Amino acid sequence: PATVTIAPGGTVTWTFAETHNVTFNAAAPTGGNIPDTPSGSVSRTFPAAGSFPYRCTLHAGMNATVNVQ
Protein backbone atom coordinates (compact mmCIF):
# COMPACT_ATOMS: atom_id res chain seq x y z
CA PRO A 1 0.00 0.00 0.00
CA ALA A 2 1.02 3.62 -0.46
CA THR A 3 0.74 4.21 3.30
CA VAL A 4 0.84 1.87 6.25
CA THR A 5 0.27 2.89 9.88
CA ILE A 6 1.74 0.88 12.74
CA ALA A 7 2.30 1.35 16.47
CA PRO A 8 5.75 2.18 17.87
CA GLY A 9 7.76 -1.02 18.09
CA GLY A 10 5.89 -2.49 15.12
CA THR A 11 7.51 -4.27 12.21
CA VAL A 12 6.95 -3.93 8.45
CA THR A 13 7.89 -6.78 6.12
CA TRP A 14 8.54 -6.22 2.42
CA THR A 15 8.23 -9.27 0.17
CA PHE A 16 9.88 -9.14 -3.24
CA ALA A 17 9.22 -11.39 -6.24
CA GLU A 18 11.79 -9.46 -8.31
CA THR A 19 14.63 -7.08 -7.47
CA HIS A 20 13.61 -4.05 -5.38
CA ASN A 21 15.10 -1.94 -2.62
CA VAL A 22 13.75 0.32 0.11
CA THR A 23 15.53 3.66 0.38
CA PHE A 24 14.25 5.98 3.09
CA ASN A 25 14.10 9.68 2.18
CA ALA A 26 15.49 10.88 5.52
CA ALA A 27 15.44 9.05 8.84
CA ALA A 28 15.52 5.27 8.52
CA PRO A 29 14.43 2.69 11.09
CA THR A 30 16.75 0.34 12.92
CA GLY A 31 18.61 -1.65 10.26
CA GLY A 32 18.53 1.23 7.78
CA ASN A 33 17.80 1.04 4.07
CA ILE A 34 17.16 -2.30 2.40
CA PRO A 35 19.67 -2.87 -0.43
CA ASP A 36 18.76 -4.38 -3.82
CA THR A 37 17.09 -7.68 -2.99
CA PRO A 38 16.24 -10.08 -5.85
CA SER A 39 13.51 -12.02 -4.01
CA GLY A 40 12.36 -12.96 -0.54
CA SER A 41 11.32 -10.96 2.51
CA VAL A 42 13.06 -8.29 4.57
CA SER A 43 11.72 -6.65 7.76
CA ARG A 44 12.40 -3.46 9.64
CA THR A 45 11.21 -2.54 13.14
CA PHE A 46 10.18 1.06 13.86
CA PRO A 47 10.81 1.74 17.57
CA ALA A 48 9.63 5.38 17.71
CA ALA A 49 6.79 7.49 16.34
CA GLY A 50 7.35 9.35 13.09
CA SER A 51 6.77 9.38 9.37
CA PHE A 52 9.15 7.35 7.20
CA PRO A 53 8.71 8.01 3.47
CA TYR A 54 10.65 5.68 1.18
CA ARG A 55 11.10 4.70 -2.46
CA CYS A 56 12.53 1.96 -4.64
CA THR A 57 15.38 3.61 -6.53
CA LEU A 58 15.14 0.95 -9.26
CA HIS A 59 11.53 1.72 -10.22
CA ALA A 60 10.24 5.26 -10.78
CA GLY A 61 6.98 5.96 -8.98
CA MET A 62 7.35 3.25 -6.35
CA ASN A 63 6.94 5.44 -3.28
CA ALA A 64 5.26 4.85 0.05
CA THR A 65 5.27 5.92 3.69
CA VAL A 66 5.33 4.08 7.00
CA ASN A 67 3.54 6.14 9.65
CA VAL A 68 4.34 5.15 13.22
CA GLN A 69 1.90 6.47 15.81
Image (tube, rainbow, N blue to C red):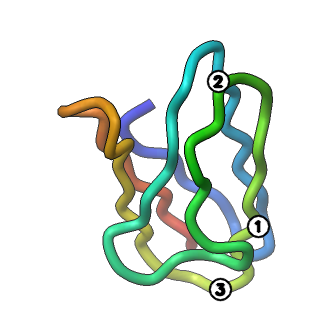
Q: Is residue 22 above or below residue 16?
A: below
Q: Provide the secondary structure element on which disc 2 rests.
A: strand
First in residue order: circle 2 vs circle 1: 2
Instruction: Name the quarter where the N terminus is drawn.
Output: top left
| Residue at the spot of label 3 | 48
Which residue occupies 70% across, 50% down? 12
Q: Quick check: 30 above or below 33?
A: below
Of residue 68 and residue 46, the one placed in the foreground of this image is 46
Q: Could you tell me which residue is drawn at 76 percent across and 44 percent down?
A: 42
Q: Which mark is residue 55?
A: none
Label 3 close to label 2 by CB (< 8 Å): no
* Nearest-to-viewer mark from 1 and 3: 1
Left or right of 62: which side holds 69?
A: right
In front: label 2 or label 1: 2
Q: Is residue 53 above or below residue 16?
A: below
Separation of residues labelled 3 and 2 (CA atoms): 25 Å
* Residue 2 occupies quadrant: top left
Front position among marks 3 and 2:
2
Quadrant in which residue 11 is drawn? bottom right
Residue nearest the observer in this picture, 18 or 30: 18
* Residue position marked by numbered label 2 in the rendering: 16
Q: Is residue 5 left or right of residue 12?
A: left
Marks 1 and 3, Cα distance to the nearest angstrom?
Answer: 9 Å
Q: Are marks 2 and 1 in contact (CB under 8 Å)?
A: no
Task: Report the amino acid beneath label 2.
Answer: Phe
Q: Amino acid at mark 1?
A: Thr
Measured Cα–Cα span from mark 2 to mark 1 = 18 Å
Residue 53 relative to residue 46: left or right: left
In the rendered image, which residue does mark 1 sit on? 45
Residue at the spot 57% in from the left edge and 82% down from the top edge: 49
Mark 2, Cα crowd under 10 Å, few <14 / some 14-19 / many 20+, is: some
Q: Nearer the viewer, residue 11 or 24?
A: 24
